[in-house]
Amino acid sequence: MRISLRELIGIVTIAGLLIGLTTSTWKLRRLKDEVGRLREEVGDLGQTEADEIAAVRLTSDQPLTYRFRVRVPETAGAAYRIAYSTWWPQSQTRPEWFAATPVPPGDSVVVMSIGRDVRDDRWKISTLVRNPQQTRRVATVLPETHVNVFRGSHDVVRTGIGRGVLAKPVGRSIRILEDRWLVGEGSLMLYGDSGPDEDQIGVYAELQLDDGPL
């Protein structure tokens, strides 16, 4: 079987195109995987309405460390904050907030952590809000009873936001973190609007209006 020069050139050209297409497909797949990994690390709130706040949970590879991306629209017309706590008192409808960190308009990364502060050797819960303009951090020393729980091994019930974006109208709040440590015989009992039957230690955080005392 004899192949003409024109046919040989055609075969080589087609082979080159197939190799190029395969290489481009492989590179595109790698880029998509990289974009997915970056979205998990830095968060992607996508497009939200101009009158909505939004939040999404990010990956974290450190124990007792929680990361989120939150958005407060530039036209919100109201100030927002991240309130945090490790204590939900008996029969109360919400946690007793320890303190709060202001959240400026735009997108911010929120990092919450519980652990020993190397500067004074005390266990604290801290909240850091970071955006292109500024970084603000607030911390609270934890009671010894709470420290003992966090240092132990317990089951945890998580009911805060997940990896999907949650948006709500301006004026509403988003409970971005609600992890309840199950400690004691009554710890498995679920509760509704009436609050827990016993004081509930956990990690709680909320994106809420900054419109007065906590």
Image: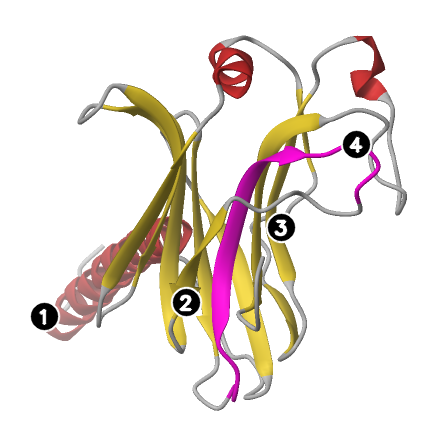
Q: Residue at x 40, y 65 (%)?
A: 102
Badge 2 vs badge 4, beta-carbon distance below 8 Å: no
Alpha carbon distance from label 2 to label 4: 29 Å
Q: Point out the tag, 1 or 4, that comes first from the N-terminus.
A: 1
Camera-near label (1 vs 3) is 3
Q: Is residue 1 shown left or right of residue 141?
A: left
Q: Amino acid at mark 1?
A: Leu
Instruction: Determine whether the residue tagged by mark 2 lies in a helix, strand or loop.
Output: strand
140, 66: nearer the viewer: 140
Q: Point out the tag, 3 or 2, that comes first from the N-terminus.
A: 2
Magenta segment includes 88: yes
Camera-near label (1 vs 2) is 2
Instruction: Determine whether the residue tagged by mark 1 lies in a helix, strand or loop.
Output: helix
Disc 2: which residue: 103
Is residue 45 visible in the rendered image? The answer is no
Q: Does residue 96 sit above or below 196 in this rendering?
A: below
Q: Does residue 16 sit above or below 127 in this rendering?
A: below
Disc 3: which residue: 161
Q: Residue at x 62, y 50 (%)?
A: 161
Density class for disc 2 (Cα within 10 Å; few <14, some 14-19, many ≥20) is: many
Disc 4: which residue: 90
Badge 1 vs badge 3, beta-carbon distance below 8 Å: no
Camera-near label (1 vs 4) is 4
Q: Point out the tag, 1 or 2, that comes first from the N-terminus.
A: 1
Alpha carbon distance from label 1 to label 3: 65 Å
Q: Point out the tag, 2 or 4, that comes first from the N-terminus.
A: 4
